[in-house]
Amino acid sequence: MPLPLAAASLAPGLTLAMTGIVKTFPGVRALDAADLDIRAGEIHGLVGENGAGKSTIIKILGGVYARDAGDILANGEVLAGGAAADMHAIGIRIIHQELNLVDHFTVAESVFLGQERTDRFGGLAKRRMRREAEAFLRDVLECPLDGQTLIRDLGIAERKLVQIAAALIDGKARLVVFDEPTAPLAAAETGRLFNAIRNLKARGVSILYVSHYLGEIVDICDRVTVFRNGRHVAVLDAPNPTRTDEIITWMIGRQLDDLYPAAAVRTADGIEAEPSFAVERLGDGRSFADVSFSLAKGEIFGIAGLIGSGRDELVDGLYGLRPPATGRVTRAGRPIRLDPALAVQSGLVLVPRDRRRDGLVLDLAVTDNINLASLDEVSTAGFRRERRANARATRLADLLDIRPRSVGTRAGLLSGGNQQKVVLGRWLAAEAEIFLLDEPTIGVDIGARAEIYRLVRELADGGATVIVSSGDAAELIGLCDRIAVLVRGKLVEIVRCGEISVDGLIARTTDAAGQRVAS
Amino acid sequence: MTQSSFVSTLGRTLAGGLIGGISLLALAAGAASAQDLSLAGKTIGVAVVGTQHFWDREAFKGATEEIEKLGGTVVPTDGGRDNQVHANNHDVFITRKVDAVITILGDASVDPKLKALKAAGIPVFTVDHLSPEAVNNTASDNYFTGSQIGILLAKAIGGKGKVAVFNAFSGSLQFCGVRYDLWKYVLEDFPEIEIIKPELAEVFANSPEDARKQTLALLEQHPKGTLDAIHVACWDQPAIGVVQAIEEAGRAGDVVVTAVDAGPETLEIIAEKDSPFVANIAQQPYLIGKTAAENVARHFAGEKLLSQTFVPVIPVDGPEEAKRVYKQLGYGTIN
Amino acid sequence: MSLAISAPSSRAWLAGLVSHAALIVLTLLLAYLALRAPNFLDAQNLTAILRQSAPLAILACGLSVVVIGGGDDVVSGGIDLSLPAAAVLGAGIISYQLSVAGSGLGTALLFGLPAVLAVGAANSLLVVGIGLTPLLATLATSVAVSGLTKLITSNRRINVSNRAIDWVRDGDIGGIPASMLLALLVFAGLAFLVHRTRWGAHLQAIGASRAVASLTGLPTRKSVALSYGLAAAAAAVAAIAILARGSGSSPGSEEPLLLEMVLATFLGGAFSRRRIVTVWGALLGAVLVTALSTGFALLQVNIFWVSGIKGGLILLVLVAAALDERLRR
Ligand SMILES: Nc1ncnc2c1ncn2[C@@H]1O[C@H](COP(=O)(O)OP(=O)(O)OP(=O)(O)O)[C@@H](O)[C@H]1O
Ligand SMILES: [Mg+2]
């Protein structure tokens, strides 16, 4: 059922041709004569490894960066300028990979930032903006939010939707660019987003869609361009699920054998008798209640759930970021205090969701960032251990294929996915018995993702207990031994991975919430 | 200007000698003799511009202790040596509905507040602050002070030489104008004494340290033999820094310092052997404050007060006199 | 075991306490003054507070615009320490023109006010044009401007008596002191610009995050430059209020204003739901800071204690803001 768009009429879609685009950053040639060609009214996919240049070409399209060379033709006419205002004027709207929202702005202010509505006297029409923002979010994105809510009180997925609303609300969009929009979204939200995208397409708007989820790409796109090392290497027409292997091969320049590793020892029933980590009747008094599970050594345990299921809050609670009001957590039978500051000491490694903010020293070089965790160990364990940690970190950088690997590169200048890899690499290099990974592969390309899965399985096989919270059902099923399903703050079921399909898992997280996966 | 011509006439009469000072002393002593003064049941606001400096503190102490002795209640305020804060503090007295106010020092920013007090029916008594709103102003005999320090300075440099002067306040504080004008008037009689232009301007708060820096710069500009004296025209806190700078620069014996006020700290400096600080005029701040409090009581007793009450000063010329005056004013003894 | 739970929930309690710490302490102080300081709540005293707070309120409103546009990070964010010095320069020039050079009020203003605006332009150039840290750049201009004031006034007090200036000092319209009306005018103008216009919305976004602003295509440099200009315009009005309050200009009057301006502005952040500096928060902050001074004077608290308390309060505000940020993560 098509959803109504707030703006009754949209301008017809834009035909866009970018040819020979070059963009060089100090030390890196991010785009090396890349072509990108988008037809009016199509959904065009753009894929490539982390650092392939996807975000860079999009930023050129949005006027954030100026191109060094190359032409842009919009509806056949050469675009002379390239400033943000020019791009906005011809109807290009970008939903950036980074969340471009101000923490202390309200939803309404964020949606209308840069395109505020004013009244007759030049003052802001606050009430009107609030009404329109709420209506748009509710009707088009199926995300009912109070326009007065502050961004900092929203979850990542809701923020993404606000960002999308901001790009579309003026109704003048002719080419909408989505740079990895679904990364923070769970299946149901993704479904809503796809509805909105198809709806845009139905109205003739052109769409450029960037994602590492090839399933989404083949599902939604009419054509796909593949980037590698700053160049276009292939344009595929009519992508479909049977062609994902082909896309992967173009992307990484080789074939990928298996995305998910085989578990060495699938956990048997017996081990629960001697739990290494247990949660008893945990609740925060608001978002989740009465959650209990107990985990064995060597187990990978998944947590599944939609926005509002209490999954994020539960993970925050386990970190000690948000205090649980009831219940307790034990490790090897002894209660532990949940406090991020104490975690490392007590052998817990916490990999937060928002790694760019919480985990990365943007001004430090890549290698320093990876070695941060091992630097910590120097003080407690002396020189030998530091060397070992160093060696391990270096191996991780190789394995995860962090690019560019030049020592001097500041972490802040890496592509989104490469930043994720740096932080993950650092935490996975730490020595610990319990790992808590929140959305470990957001924004990571498929080649590196396989490496991350393999590493996680290695950790488990080495005796560690790993908890993975993820909105990607396929990832949970491929990686975990057991999965807890959260619905509306309740742990409704713990399923074994061998006994459930991806669709089955999604259904369990959604059906009880009264929502169906769209499409 | 009429004021300056008045000043010069008065200066001429005073330049002759100490007669004026003695007669004023008699006047003050005679006034204090009334036995039946009382402030019982009265609340008196006492505002002082600051309590860091000896002079301010003593005048404040003299006023408050006398009020209490006369049975009155004191509402004190302290401006922390910030004229604006001092002025604002007067609002407290209106709020508290005091019976009378004694205000010690302060610049013109106080005047509107005094006007408001008067309008609210609260009589105002000032100390070293001339204002048409005040019933009475109690102050040292500044005419004698100014001319006498001029004479002592001339004597110290043998009637000739170059003199630098710190004079920030002659334009904004009436009593400073008197001290400065009469000092200059006396020096006119010594044609070989030259006052260096431009004059220096000291600051109100933190004055010793600021004066030290300014003096160091001054000494750089005027090498040995081209500067004979530095005078601080209206008080002596900056003189502490001036003396420091002279000693730091090794110019003691070359440049002498004079100033007015002579609190215990500066008397101690003058009393030192070979001190560059050679002359001062001692005020009696405690007595001034006390006299202001008595004037309040006289006012309530129905007595008609003159608009000015002068309190005598004591010239200090050299270390021996410094020691004597130190003892005489009850500050203790210096050996 | 209760240990496992009580620790984190006491943390939540702590977070709440920290984010409201400044408010709580201020409320307690004011409540104490209302109860203990004689006649604190009298209409006469309240009017006196309003009258006294005008220069501070104007400066704080001006500073709030700079902080909003530059971000409230205490070290790298937007700040203009030169505002009090610029205002005192203006007051000095106007006094000099009126009392020494003998010009009329119009001429005096024509000399004085543009000088204050020029300080703002210099700050814009240093911060936006050259890219210096606002804290250091405006500290430097502040020192330079103070020196200039001393030069112009020969470091002396200049008395001024002028009917219009006296009216600003003593007059009122409908019971509201004229100087406070001046402050309200500045407040209304700046609050409208910052909180009610597109430009203001953009300025807030720029201050909150340069990255967001540039991704959204907002003109960051122009807006930030203008924020220093607006602050200087406020300082120009403050010059008149300072001149009126002191019936002239005194060297060094910028010093006590500096601390109180920063205190009032950042204290204002504690009043907003979003914990951000706002124009109206700065106005309210200025009035409350003045109320504290008056209340302590009524209670006959030693003036140096009062400075100590204000210094402590500003530390509390800054520390609470920093901790709040950390605890919210
Ligand atoms: N501002 C910058 N300064 C220096 N180098 C940069 C900058 N922005 C991007 N790069 C580099 O350009 C290359 C391409 O980055 P880009 O962000 O376009 O990758 P991407 O394809 O979007 O990757 P991902 O999937 O990880 O988001 C990377 O090597 C990156 O490090
Ligand atoms: Mg990217």
Image (cartoon, rainbow, N blue to C red):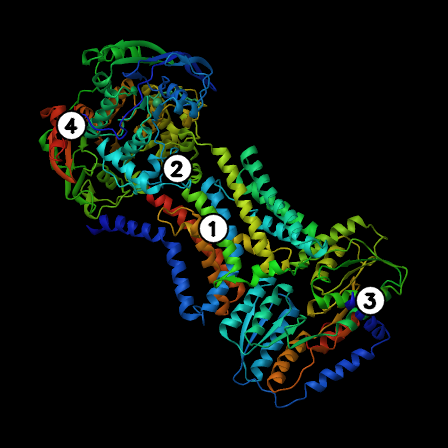
Q: Position of residue A242 (x, y in %)?
A: 18, 11
Q: Position of residue A65 (x, y in %)?
A: 44, 22
Q: Is the same chain shared between marks 1 and 3?
A: no
Q: Is the same chain shared between marks 3 and 4?
A: no
What is the number of the mark on residue A379? 2
Q: Amino acid at mark 3?
A: Gly
Q: Amino acid at mark 4?
A: Val
Q: Is the same chain shared between marks 2 and 4?
A: yes
Q: Callout 2: 10 Å neighbours few (<14), some, many (20+)? A: few
Position of the C terminus of chain B, as image quadrant, is bottom right
Is the Cβ of the residue at disc 2 closer than 8 Å to that at disc 3? no
A427, A132: nearer the viewer: A132
Q: Is the same chain shared between marks 1 and 4?
A: no
Q: Secondary structure at mark 3?
A: helix
Q: The disc numbered 1 marks a residue on which chain?
A: C
In the image, the residue with mark 4 has its CB under 8 Å from the nearest atom of ligand 1: no
From the image, tell me which residue sits under label 1.
C187
A358, C84: nearer the viewer: C84
Q: Secondary structure at mark 2?
A: helix
From the image, tell me which residue sits under label 3.
B150
A325, A2: nearer the viewer: A2
What is the number of the mark on residue A285? none
Q: Callout 4: 10 Å neighbours few (<14), some, many (20+)? A: some
From the image, tell me which residue sits under label 4.
A517
Residue B279 makes an appearance in the image: no
Q: Amino acid at mark 2?
A: Ser
Q: Amino acid at mark 1?
A: Phe
A347, C97: nearer the viewer: C97
Disc 1 and disc 4: Cα gap in Å? 52 Å
Disc 2 and disc 3: Cα gap in Å? 73 Å
